[in-house]
Image (tube, helix red, strand yellow):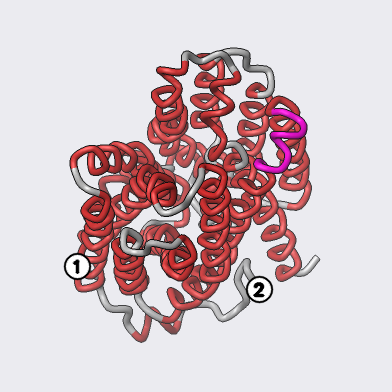
Amino acid sequence: MTAARVRRRAFVALWLGQFVAVAGLTVVVPLLPFYLAGLGTDPDYVAWWTGVSLAAPAVAQVLAGPLWGWVGDRYGRKAMVVRALAGLALSVGLMALAVSPAQFLACRLLQGLFGGVVPASATFASSLAAPGRRGRALGGLFTATGAGALVGPLLGGLLAGRYGFGPLFAGVAALLAVAVVAAAVLLTEPPREPRPGRASVASVREVSGRLFRARHVRALVLAGLAGQAAAYALVVVFAPRVGQITSSVGEATAWVGVLQAATWAASLGGAPWWGARNDRSRPPRSFAWAAAGCALAVALQAVPADPELLLPLRLLQGLCFAALAQSVLHVVGRSVADSAQGSGLGVTSSLLELGQVLGPLFGALAASLLPPPAAFTAIGALFVLAAALAMRSARLTPPVTAAARSTVPTEAGVAS
């Protein structure tokens, strides 16, 4: 089998796994309050359980992500992709059996501890792609995130009411099991740099120290954290804003679904473009321009009095948001040795996951203390901070010499 065919097979398996994972995890998120209420949660505590359940996987992933990355560096990247998909399948399957909010929360913590499909897939793709095609590889892979986030909520709304949440979770777990088999069969361990033995693998602490001593990497990771926090803060204030400018709960719910779908459709289309741009120019600059676009789109969402006028702003937001995480992972991936890719990307993904924890807290604080226009402006300011940090990273990034460029292989990467 040719090397190009091996890469194409690997990309299909990675894309399928990431799509199913994201779609499966987002299928219930918009309906989570209804699901928790159905588990017998006290109505006065539904909002609290919803917030804790949303944050739980991120908290667990912050702790487990770097460890799994190090294990992947030591024992192989394919095993980490299979492990992440299998761990997610197990946790989602157990969600189908949950009969109390505490049991569901335990499943969400298990998801964070043993999941982590996105960093595992990104590490594999970065290892397999030629250096000059890494941006295209990550951009193509992140289309799976956009597609999954687009399809998941739509299917959740259609299927949960007809079949219930238990069968829905069971169906997602079954699809994840198919993705596990596909990854086990189609993935071939990417080539590794020669090293004397397993003992030569650097610890997570060593990799983190080397990585974040580089000021341009440190600035861009902080920019990514700010961008993630802003995105999750927006979740808190967006639906209430749509409710203010619509005439009924039913109309508001429908418009939230449409606008969410439009956002992720734009992200799906933008991810490959940003990836190709990152191969041609400095990823921190792409991040800075994209974060500035997000800031503008978010700040203006407090202005329209009709939900239709939110549509172009959500399209701009989705297009620009597609650049953020992949640009950070691109820079980190080329800043660490091949033997430390898993640890480097694991640590970085864990830090980005903090945005899922800090963002809703910021959004809730802004919503409680500020009028709606000011709350959207405050969240837009977080994106402005992210853009400023990314521009600092761009200024600090060492130039690529002609000699270094000449060593970049020209063969097609994983996304070809």
Residue 243, compared with residue 404, is above or below; it is above
Q: CA distance from mark 1 to mark 2?
A: 32 Å
* Disc number placed over residue 26 in the picture, else none: none
- Give coordinates of residue 292: x percent, y percent: 29, 69
Left or right: 309 as drawn, with respect to 171: left
Name the quarter where the C terminus is drawn: bottom right
Other residues around mark 1 within 10 Å, as few (<14) / some (14–19) / many (≥20): some
Range drawn in magenta: 156-164
* Disc number placed over residue 416 in the picture, else none: 2
Helix, strand or loop at mark 1: helix
Q: How many marks?
A: 2
Q: What residue is rendered at 75% in x and 40% in y?
A: 175
Q: What residue is rendered at 57% in x and 35% in y?
A: 31
Residue 314, compared with residue 366, is above or below; it is below
Secondary structure mainly formed by the magenta segment: helix
Q: Is residue 115 magenta?
A: no
Q: Earlier in the sequence, mark 1 or mark 2?
A: 1
Q: Nearer the viewer, mark 1 or mark 2?
A: 1
Left or right: 163 as drawn, with respect to 51: right
Q: Nearer the viewer, residue 50 or 351?
A: 50
Q: Nearer the viewer, residue 407 or 253?
A: 253
Q: Is residue 158 magenta?
A: yes
Q: Amino acid at mark 1?
A: Arg
Left or right: 3 as drawn, with respect to 146: right
Q: Nearer the viewer, residue 177 or 47?
A: 47
Residue 384 seen in the figure? yes
- Give coordinates of residue 86: x percent, y percent: 66, 34
Q: What residue is rendered at 50% in x and 37% in y?
A: 71
Report the residue marked by disc 1: 392
- Give coordinates of residue 115: x percent, y percent: 55, 35
Name the quarter where the N terminus is drawn: bottom right
Q: Amino acid at mark 2?
A: Ser
